[in-house]
Image (cartoon, helix red, strand yellow):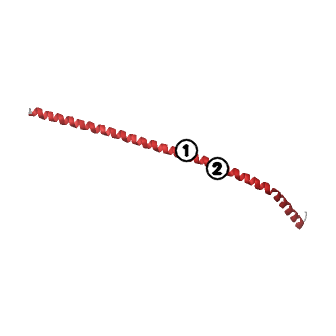
Amino acid sequence: MAANLVDEIKAAEDKAAAGLRDARASAAKRLNGALTDAENLVKEAKQGAAKQFRENISAAEKKAEEKAREIVTGREATGKTFYAQHKDKVAKTAAWITEEVMARYGRG
């Protein structure tokens, strides 16, 4: 009976050890799976953030280009207005300078 009891105890210990090994293996698999999932989530989050950053930069560049076009258009209009207001003055001034030079240095 003692030998039978020892065999039963050894069998129970072996069964417990096997259960412990299985539990450790299962825990390791779950841990590795969780780590892989976490790494994938981090990777996806980084990719999403990078994509959103690029989209934000692109949108900001488009807004800046539109604003620059508005400024250039406004400045062109201002320049044309200035030119129209002063072109007669320039022609008169050029004629006056020509007359002064001709008067001082002669015609030829």
User: Which residue occupies 69% across, 51% down?
Assistant: 72
Q: Is residue 96 left or right of residue 66?
A: right
User: Which residue occupies 15% across, 35% down?
Assistant: 9
Per the image, label 1 sits on a secondary structure element best described as: helix
Which residue is under mark 2?
67
Per the image, label 2 sits on a secondary structure element best described as: helix
Q: Which quadrant would residue 36 be assigned to in this image?
A: top left
Q: Is residue 79 left or right of residue 46?
A: right
**Can you say which quadrant of the picture contains the C terminus?**
bottom right
Instruction: In the rendered structure, find residue 63 and report the number of the disc placed on it.
Output: none
Nearest to viewer (mark 1 / mark 2):
2
Q: Estimate how packed mark 1 is, as few (under 14), some (14 to 19) or many (20 or more) residues with alpha carbons within 10 Å.
A: few
Residue at the extreme right:
107
Question: How far across and down, in percent of the image, does residue 34 sit?
Answer: 36, 40
Name the N-terminal-most of marks 1 and 2: 1
- The type of residue carrying mark 1 is Glu
Question: How far across and down, in percent of the image, does residue 4 sit?
Answer: 11, 32
- The type of residue carrying mark 2 is Lys
The correct choice, above or below, for 73 with respect to 26 in the image is: below
Question: How far across and down, in percent of the image, does residue 102 sit?
Answer: 89, 64
Q: Are marks 1 and 2 in contact (CB under 8 Å)?
A: no
Residue at the extreme bottom:
104
User: Which residue occupies 42% across, 41% down?
Assistant: 41
Mark 1 → mark 2, Cα distance in angstroms: 18 Å
Which residue is under mark 1?
55
Q: Is residue 81 left or right of residue 14?
A: right
Q: How many marks?
A: 2
The correct choice, above or below, for 99 with respect to 62 in the image is: below
**Can you say which quadrant of the picture contains the N terminus?**
top left
Q: Which quadrant would residue 11 be assigned to in this image?
A: top left
